[in-house]
Each structure stands twice: as structure tokens, then as C-alpha cells.
Amino acid sequence: MKSPVDTEISRRGILVGGVATAALTVSTADAQTPPTPAQPATMKVSFDVNGKRRNLELDTRTTLLDALREHLHLTGTKKGCDHGQCGACTVMVDGQRINSCLSLAVMHQGDRITTIEGLGQPDRLHPMQAAFVKHDGYQCGYCTPGQICSAVAVLDEIKAGIPSHATGDFTTRPAITNEEIRERMSGNICRCGAYSNIVDAINDVAGVRA
């Protein structure tokens, strides 16, 4: 007859052996069937880009900026800070300027989007593009597409009577002044420092419109 000590050792051995066998079974199963990574959610989106209807199926996390650059190959719109701080990615959506890096593409179902390519081409420049060339409103040119899209929208905002922080009297329509232009363009950063020439270009176009 076994002693109580022998019986206790035997029970412990059985328990330890059982746990080890279970662990080995789980480990072997994991090695044979690795977990399948979750597929990203996608969604169909359709919008008008520079006058053409574009239909895409995108990861729902795709920004409008990446949809334009990576999926539609409209690389005129630039990725700068990717945090909405530099304005290089500015485009116009239904006539209003936005930072496309901060907006998801799937939010723009049915919208009308205008990029720098839609404003004008080398053989038919938009007046703002021509004014930037005339007044040297750029140096390296990286920020220029966003600057031009923003500048076009700025003049439309002033024309519509939308005030800014530089507007002294909200009861009257804002005027086109250097202070108004600089305030409204303050979200577009030019590291080369061509700000005075950019203001000159915008004033030039405003004068032509007037």
C-alpha cells in the first residue's frame, strides 16, 4: 500500500502532466492555424472631381487627400504636415476651401471637388495661377497649389460678404485689403516666405474682377 506522501505526489504529477499536455495542444493548434488578420472596412463613394464623376471603393479611413493623390493620381494637391496646419493640401469642396488631409473621402459622397488641376492647365491658366506667375508668388512651389486654391476661395468669401477676424465692422461688407487677405490666408504656410508677392497676386486678380 502506498503512503499518503506517494499518493499526493502522484496526484500532483497527474495535474502537472495534464496542464503541460493542454498547453502543448494549444501551442500546436496555434502554430498550424495562425489567426487571420481582420480585413479593413471599405465603402463605395462617388463624387465629382474637376468636372468628372469618379467612383471609388476605399478603406473608410482613407482621407480625401490620399484618395486624390494615391487613387486618382491628382498629385498637384500636396501632403505637407498631414495635420491641417500648413494648408498645402487645400482643395475646394462645393466652392468652400478645406484641408483635405483632415477629411475622410467617404464623407464627400456626391460633392463637387476642385483641385489645382481643375482650376487651370499650362495652356489655359486660371487668372489666379497667372497672377502667381506674374508676381513670383512662390519659390520652391510646394505650397503653391494650396495657396492658389485658398486664394481663389478667399476672394469668393469676400465677395459673399463673409467676415474674418480682420473685419472691423461686421455690419458692412468686408473690403479687399492687405489685412483681410493676410488674415484669410494665414492658414497657408509658405516656408520660402513669398507672402508679400502672394498678396500682390491676389490683389491683382481682385482688381481684374472689380
Image (cartoon, grey):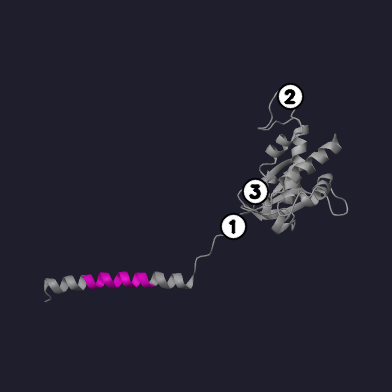
Q: Residues within 10 Å of mark 1 (few under 14, many from 20)?
A: few
The residue lying toward the viewer, choosing from 107 and 3, is 107
Q: Residue at x 64, y 48 (%)?
A: 86
Q: Give the range drawn in magenta.
A: 12-24
Q: Which mark is residue 172?
A: 2
The residue labelled by disc 1 is 40
Badge 1 or badge 2: first in the primary sequence: 1
Q: For the residue marked with disc 3, what is the amino acid?
A: Cys
| Depth check, front residue: 13 or 54 | 54
> For the stretch drawn in magenta, what is the main secondary structure?
helix
Q: Which of marks 2 and 3 is nearer the N terminus?
A: 3
User: What is the crowding at mark 2: few (fewer than 14 residues within 10 Å), some, or many (at least 20)?
Assistant: few
- Image position of 82 (left or right of 23): right
What is the total number of numbered labels drawn onto the structure image?
Answer: 3
Query: In the rendering, which numbered label is found on residue 54?
Result: none
Give the quadrant of residue 205.
Answer: top right
Q: Is residue 67 above or below residue 167?
A: below
Is 15 one of the magenta-colored residues?
A: yes
